[in-house]
Amino acid sequence: MSGLRVAIIPVTDFQQNCTVLFEEAGRQAVVFDPGGEADRILEMLAQEELEVQRILLTHGHLDHAGGAAPLQAALNAQRDAQGKPRIEIWGPDKRDRFLLDSIEQHQALFGLSGLVNVTPDRWLADGDVVEFGELRFDVLHCPGHSPGSVVYVEKTARFAIVGDVLFRGSIGRTDFPYGDHDALIDAITTKLLPLGDDIVFICGHGQGSTFGEERRGNPFLR
C-alpha cells in the first residue's frame, strides 16, 4: 500500500529484527518484536517523528520480547504527559506466557542485561485480526519454535511478519524442550505457503524472502 514504510532495527547480540511499520504521511507506527536496546528504538522513533500506536510480539523469546516493557514504559510516559491514550502490547498466543515470565531469569545466560519480563495487555489467538491504518493483519498461530508463536499476515498488501517461524533457507529452531519440529513444518506448509508465492515476509533474523522462494528452495520444506 502506498505511503507505508518499513524500518528494521537489529537489536542485541542476537541481531533480532525489530520492525517498525509506519505511515509516511501521518507518521503513525507499530513496532514488532522490540527484543532489547529500547533506547536505540526510541531514538529511531524520535528521529523519524513517529507516534507508536501499538507494540506487537510474535513470540515470547527474550530476544524478541525483552525490550517491550521498557519501550512501552518510555512511550507511555511521553503520552501521559501529552494526555494521549496509552500504548498496549499485543501478542503472542498465551501459550508463551512461561517464556515472557522468565526473560529476566534467562538473560544472564546469554550475557545480556536490561531485558524485562512482560505481560501483554492482550493475548492473541489464531483467527484474530489486528488493524493499523489501512492494514488488516490476520493472526495465525504457528507453534513449533515456541508453543505460542504467531505470524501476522496482511493479505491485501501481500506481506507478513513471521518472527522465527520461517527464515530464508531455514526454519525456526525446535531443539528446545518445548519445541515441536512436526508442528512447525505443519504450520508452515498448511497455514503460510498456501497464502501465495508472492507474499514477502520479514523474519526475526537475517534477510527476508517470499513464501514462493521458500516453497521452492528451502531444504527443510522439501
Image (spheres, grey):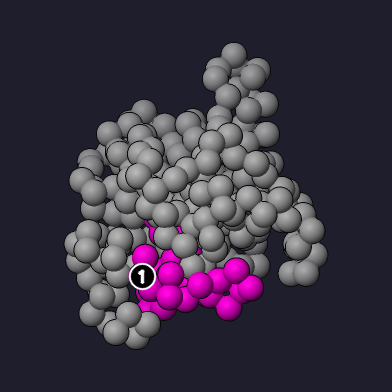
- Chain part drawn in magenta: 161-187
Residue 46 visible (yes or no): no
- Report x, y in % for residue 75: 61, 32
Q: Which amino acid, mark 1? A: Asp
Residue 211 in which image quadrant: bottom left
Residue 146 appears left or right of 193:
right
Q: Count how many numbered circles sit on residues in the image.
A: 1
Q: Position of residue 47 (x, y in %)?
A: 53, 39
- On the rendered structure, is 136 left or right of 106? left
Q: Nearer the viewer, residue 6 or 141?
A: 141
State whether residue 145 appears in this view. Answer: yes
Q: Quadrant of the N terminus?
A: top left
**Closer-to-camera residue (49/115):** 115
Eyeballing the image, is 62 above or below 75? below
Secondary structure of residue under mark 1: helix
Q: Is residue 157 magenta?
A: no
- Dot 1 corresponds to which residue? 186
Q: Is residue 153 above or below residue 111?
A: above
Give the residue drawn at x 34%, y 85%: 219
Question: In what quadrant of the picture does the C terminus appear?
Answer: bottom left
Q: Residues within 10 Å of mark 1 (few under 14, many from 20)?
A: some
Q: Is residue 204 depicted above or below 67 in this figure?
A: below
Q: Position of residue 191 (x, y in %)?
A: 30, 61
Residue depicted at x 29% and y 47% = 154
Residue drawn 59% across the image and 54% down it: 96
Rendered image quadrant of residue 188: bottom left
Which residue: 43% across, 51% down? 7
